[in-house]
Image: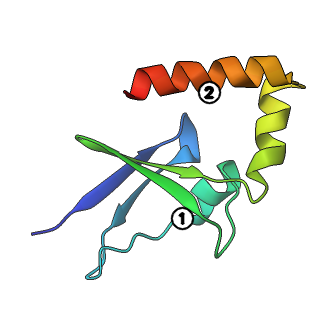
Amino acid sequence: MLLRLYLNLGEGDGMSIVEVGPKYRVTITQNVRKKIPVRVGQRVYLLARFPYVILIPIPERVDEALAKLIGDITYSREERKRADEQLSKETT
């Protein structure tokens, strides 16, 4: 049985059809790497949603990427205590 992974990253050359190897490995083609830069050894998040497989690169410095995304957030001790109490209520 031949399995194929379809990567649809937009228009034109952002799409590739690759074959799943015997150890379930997939090669990310050069035209896809140009659109979504990923390095050898970089960690990625693999999301399986039938019938799709989505590969999301994880930044090396997750904390810095998250800070860029959400901006500068500061918490007071009181806010932290309320958040901890709320979390405790939700988990019990």
The answer to which quarter of the image holds residue 38 is bottom right
**In the rendered image, which quarter contains the N terminus?**
bottom left
Alpha-carbon span between mark 1 and mark 2 = 45 Å
Apparent side of residue 36 relative to residue 92 in the rendered image (left or right): right
The three-letter amino acid code for the residue at tag 2 is: Asp
The three-letter amino acid code for the residue at tag 1 is: Thr
Residue that extends furthest to the left in the rendered view of this protein: 1
The tag on residue 45 is: none
Question: Where is residue 75 shown, x and y percent of the image?
Answer: 84, 23
Question: Where is residue 71 shown, x and y percent of the image?
Answer: 86, 25
Residue that extends furthest to the bottom in the rendered view of this protein: 22
Task: Check disc 2 and report the residue beneath it.
Answer: 84
57 in relation to 29, above or below: above
Of labels 1 and 2, earlier in sequence is 1
The answer to which quarter of the image holds residue 22 is bottom left
1 vs 2, front mark:
2
Which residue lies at the image location 79% right of the left edge and 18% below the top edge?
Answer: 78
Which residue lies at the image location 51% right of the left edge and 53% below the top edge?
Answer: 45
9 in relation to 87, above or below: below
Which residue lies at the image location 40% right of the left edge and 29% below the top edge?
Answer: 91
Q: Label 1's element?
A: loop
Which residue lies at the image location 52% right of the left edge and 25% below the top edge?
Answer: 87
Neighbour tally class for label 1: few under 14, some 14-19, many 20 plus, Cα within 10 Å = few
Task: Check disc 1 and report the residue beneath it.
Answer: 29
Compare residues 73 and 7 and report the one nearer the observer. Answer: 73
**In the rendered image, which quarter contains the C terminus?**
top left
